[in-house]
Image (cartoon, rainbow, N blue to C red):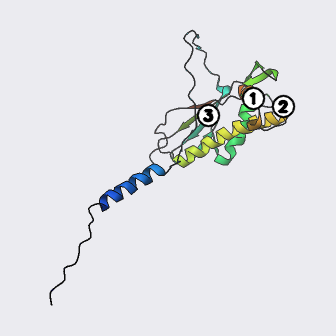
């Protein structure tokens, strides 16, 4: 009996087909993974604008520090992240006009007339060893403080949530509660983690 030769399968075009399938899936697949912090840089100052050399008063600065052990120090006091939002809201709004909280400047605001606007700034400083998770949690609490204050004022004045207001109404509320978060460059303060 003669041995029968096995026929070979022509695999020459197999690589071409695999390559085309790979290209198809790369083109057809969408990857929506936008992560990070939504922050707008302040606009460049006007060339004709005079430089303001006035120092910011200590009472107008809300100091938030995060060390390398992810501990939060707010205004010199050890604080839990969950308590940060309420402390920030009290600082930003200063509802009782306390002398140790930010000053207010009467400002002309559309829909509100002359309204006392806080001069407060939140200063955020973290250690290089701070975990990203803690940093984001602190950021979220600070932004939530502004969002809640804006929502409360929108409900009080217009009977709607902030996001449901017209653009010019939102601008008016943002003028009353401008988001002022100053972030300093991370430092090695709390030792290595």
Percent coordinates x, y for residue 51 in the rendering: 57, 12
* Mark sitting on residue 157: 2
Of residues 121 and 153, the one drawn nearer to the viewer in this rendering:
153
> Marks 1 and 3, how far apart in space?
24 Å
Which callout, 1 or 3, points to the residue nearer the camera?
1
Of residues 105 and 161, the one drawn nearer to the viewer in this rendering:
161
> Marks 3 and 2, how far apart in space?
30 Å
Check disc 3 and report its element: helix, strand or loop: strand
Q: Residues within 10 Å of mark 3 (few under 14, many from 20)?
A: some
Disc on the earlier residue, 2 or 1: 2
Q: Write down the residue under mark 1.
A: 173
What residue lies at 47% left-to-right and 41% top-to-bottom?
Answer: 128
* Mark sitting on residue 63: 3
Q: Are marks 2 and 1 in contact (CB under 8 Å)?
A: yes
Percent coordinates x, y for residue 177 in the rendering: 72, 29
* Mark sitting on residue 150: none
Work out which quarter of the rendered image holds the N terminus and state it: bottom left
> Marks 2 and 1, how far apart in space?
10 Å
């Amino acid at each position: 009996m003669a041995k029968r030769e096995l026929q070979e399968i022509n695999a020459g075009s197999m690589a071409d087909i695999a390559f085309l399938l790979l290209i198809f899936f790369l083109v057809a697949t969408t990857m929506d993974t936008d992560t990070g912090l939504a922050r707008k840089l302040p606009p460049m100052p006007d060339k004709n604008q005079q430089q303001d050399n006035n120092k910011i008063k200590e009472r107008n600065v809300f100091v938030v520090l995060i060390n390398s052990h992810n501990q939060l120090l707010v205004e010199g006091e050890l604080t839990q992240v969950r308590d940060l939002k309420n402390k920030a809201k009290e600082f930003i709004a200063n509802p009782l006009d306390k002398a140790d909280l930010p000053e207010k400047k009467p400002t002309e605001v559309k829909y509100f007339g002359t309204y006392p606007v806080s001069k407060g700034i939140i200063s955020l400083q973290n250690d290089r060893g701070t975990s990203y998770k803690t940093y984001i949690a602190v950021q979220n609490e600070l932004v939530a403080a502004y969002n809640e204050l804006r929502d409360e004022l929108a409900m009080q004045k217009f009977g709607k949530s902030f996001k449901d207001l017209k653009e010019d109404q939102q601008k008016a509320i943002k003028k009353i509660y401008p988001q002022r978060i100053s972030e300093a460059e991370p430092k090695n303060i709390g030792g290595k983690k």
